[in-house]
Image: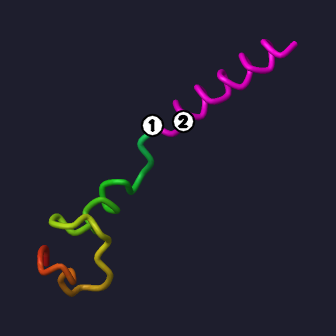
Amino acid sequence: MIVKVVVLFLLAMAVLAMFGKLRLPGQKRIASRRCPRCGRFRLGKGSCTCGGGG
């Protein structure tokens, strides 16, 4: 019985991992909003507080 539960849990985790790797629309736009130097999200039109990316 425990083996069945463990196998079902592992299968469910594998299915979730497959869905997690899907490319969703808008991913490129979200990635372009990050600072190329530090990786933080840039808010607004100004440059990043680290001094890189603008």
- Which three-letter amino acid code belongs to the residue tagged 1? Lys
User: Which SS class for mark 1?
Assistant: loop
Residue 21: which numbered mark, if any? Answer: 1
Residue ID at (71%, 25%): 9
Q: Are marks 2 and 1 in contact (CB under 8 Å)?
A: yes
Q: Position of residue 33 (x, y in %)?
A: 28, 68
Query: Residue 40 shows which numbered tag?
Result: none
Q: Quadrant of the N terminus?
A: top right
Residue at figure coordinates x 41%, y 42% from the top left:
23
Q: Residues within 10 Å of mark 2 (few under 14, many from 20)?
A: few
**In terms of image quadrants, where is residue 34?**
bottom left
Q: Residue furthest front?
A: 2
Cα–Cα span, label 2 and label 1? 5 Å
Relative placement, left or right, of 31 versus 20 is left
Question: Does residue 11 appear left or right of residue 37 in this picture?
Answer: right
Q: Main secondary structure of the magenta part?
A: helix
**Left or right of 7 on screen, residue 43:** left
Residue 10, percent from left and from top: 65, 23
Q: To which residue does mark 2 refer?
A: 19
Front residue of 39/30: it is 39
Residue interval drawn in magenta: 1-20
- The spot of residue 54 in percent (x, y) is 13, 78
Check if residue 9 falls in the magenta segment.
yes
Check disc 2 and give the amino acid type: Phe
Quadrant of the rendered image containing residue 46: bottom left
**Residue in the image at 28% along x and 76% along y:** 42
Locate residue 52, reporting x and y percent.
12, 75
Of the pair 14 and 2, the residue shown nearer to us:
2
Q: Does residue 9 sit above or below 39 in this rendering?
A: above
Q: Residue at x 29, y 69 (%)?
A: 40
